[in-house]
Amino acid sequence: MIAIGRMEIVKDGASFVTVRASGNQDLVPEESTAFNLGFLLEPIDDLSIELDYWSFDFTDLIQQHWCVESRAASQLWSKLEN
């Protein structure tokens, strides 16, 4: 097994924190279906009415989560996640 990832040192104000990012061996490509519908009406000069509708449906969405190795950041992150 090959480890995939990176480690960065990030400056946050007056201090530095270590950020680790790694890959997921079970990652599959994300897929999406999109639907767009539009309507434009120009009944008189200098007046146009436009109506747009769009819908996106994602499956296996790929997202990136950051984990910062510090007690304060971990507490803040857990509040944001919940």
Image (cartoon, helix red, strand yellow):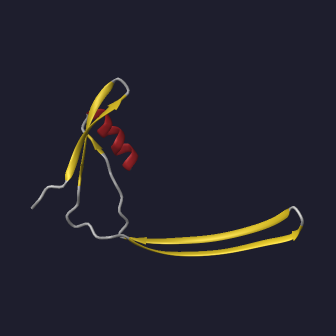
Instruction: Return the residue nearer the eye: 30 or 73.
Output: 30
Q: Quadrant of residue 45?
A: bottom right
Query: As drawn, is 28 to the left or to the right of 80?
Result: left
Q: Position of residue 81 (x, y in %)?
A: 37, 49
| Residue at the extreme front | 45
Query: As drawn, is 55 to the left or to the right of 9?
Result: right
| Residue at the extreme top | 14
Instruction: Return the residue nearer the eye: 2 or 13.
Output: 2
Residue sitting at x 25%, y 40%: 8
Q: Position of residue 43 (x, y in %)?
A: 87, 71
Query: As drawn, is 6 to the left or to the right of 15?
Result: left
| Residue at the extreme right | 44
Residue sitting at x 80%, y 72%: 41
Q: Is residue 33 above or below residue 22?
A: below
Residue sitting at x 31%, y 47%: 66
Q: Quadrant of residue 27?
A: bottom left
Q: Is residue 46 above or below residue 71?
A: below
Indicate the quadrant containing the N terminus: top left, top right, bottom left or bottom right. bottom left
Q: Is residue 4 above or below residue 12?
A: below
Q: Position of residue 40 (x, y in %)?
A: 76, 72
Q: How many marks?
A: 0
| Residue at the extreme left | 1
Residue sitting at x 72%, y 69%: 51
Q: Is residue 13 above or below residue 22?
A: above
